[in-house]
Structures are given as structure tokens and as C-alpha cells.
Amino acid sequence: MRRLVAVGKGWMMGDFDHQLRVLGAEAKILMACYVYEKELIWFSQICYVNLFSLGFEGFGLPDFEGMQFGAFMLASNSTSIPEVSGWPLF
């Protein structure tokens, strides 16, 4: 069974777990709140796509790291993320 893996749990995600329960999606999503660097590299190497949809990010380091390991990227077009990822604004 393929599952969505959410790596990291950041600012303003306090009710994320509750929303997963309300939607009945908690069995389909693996929450990996904190991972070590080697685990992050492994996740980036085996994933189908790296979704980086933050609205508040200074540089977009997770976006940059995902691309480094060949992950397909879906990223927001806010802050510096388009510049880091090299994608045009949509």
C-alpha cells in the first residue's frame, strides 16, 4: 500500500492530526515529525514527489534538498521558493 509520508511538523500545524482524524485519512498518512539527516536523504531518494507548499519560508531549503536527490518537486510560488527551484511563477 502506498502512503503519503509527511516529514516534519512545523509552525501552525497544531490541528493537523485532528484534521486527519476528521477526514478519516490518518491510516493513509505516515507522520514522520522529526527525521535524522540519513532518513531525510532516504525519503528524498525513494519518494515519487516532494510537495513543498509552504506560504512562509525564508529560503526554501527543503525544496533545494529534495531536488539535490532527484525528487520531483511540487512547490508553492511564495517567497524565494521559485527562485531556489528554478521554476517560473505561475
Image (spheres, helix red, strand yellow):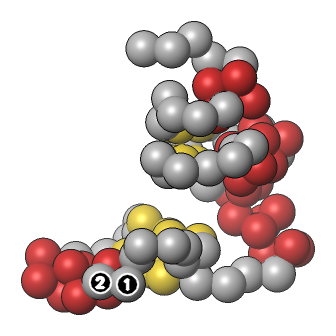
**Residue 44: which quarter of the image?**
bottom right
Place residue 63 in its image quadrant: top right
- For the residue pair 83 and 48, the one nearer the viewer reads as 83
Judge whether residue 48 can be spotted in this image.
Answer: no
Amino acid type, label 2: Asp
Residue 26 lies, in percent from the top left, at: 28, 84
Q: On the picture, is 88 further left or further right than 18?
A: right
Residue, x 42% and y 14% (percent of image)?
Answer: 90
- Which of the two residues, 7 or 44, is positioned nearer the viewer here? 7
Q: Position of residue 46 (x, y in %)?
A: 68, 57
Within 10 Å of the Cα at label 2, are there few (<14), some (14-19), or many (20+) other Cα atoms? few
Q: Which residue is mark 2?
A: 15
Tag of residue 86: none
Give the number of callouts. 2
Position of residue 36 in the picture relative to residue 47 (left or right): right
Q: Is residue 34 visible?
A: yes
Tag 1 and tag 2, C-beta contact below 8 Å = yes
Q: Quadrant of residue 86?
A: top right
Task: List the residue tagged with mark 1.
Answer: 14
Residue drawn at point x = 40 percent, y = 76 percent:
13
Q: Secondary structure at mark 2?
A: loop
